Image (spheres, grey):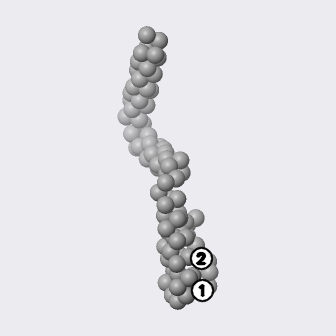
Amino acid sequence: MSSNLQGASSANSPVPVPRTGVPLGITDPVEKARAELKAALSAIEEKANLPKRAGIAADRAGTRARAFAKRKPAAAVVGAVGLATAVGVVVWGAVRIYLR
């Protein structure tokens, strides 16, 4: 997640500071307050951005599923068929309830 780092290539900051962190060494109280506010807003955005978090979780799950499919292809096929059956039953049940 290098995109969450600020100043990663800056000569002034030898250690990368996360977007949600406050750099050390700020002496001006106004600048420090601004940095803290920026870090707090970035942390809130990271936590509240559900579509982004869902996308990251989906990517992670897809990577794990592909790795599992390479290790155990037969079990992956059984799992895929089971998942497709479960989704089909849920959709069929929802349509049946809706049409009553």
Q: Earlier in the sequence, mark 1 or mark 2?
A: 2
Report which quarter residue 84 is drawn in: top left
- Residue sitting nearer the eye, 61 or 73: 61
Residue furthest right as drawn: 10
Report which quarter residue 9 is drawn in: bottom right
Q: Amino acid at mark 2?
A: Gly
Question: Element under label 2?
Answer: loop
The residue positioned 54% from the left and 76% from the top of the image is 35
How far apart, in angstroms, are the residues tagged by discs 1 and 2? Answer: 8 Å
As drawn, 53 above or below 65: below
Q: Which residue is mark 1?
A: 12
Q: Position of residue 62 (x, y in %)?
A: 48, 44
- Residue sitting nearer the eye, 97 or 68: 97
Q: Position of residue 68 (x, y in %)?
A: 41, 43
Q: Amino acid at mark 1?
A: Asn
As drawn, 35 above or below 97: below
Q: Which residue is mark 2?
A: 7
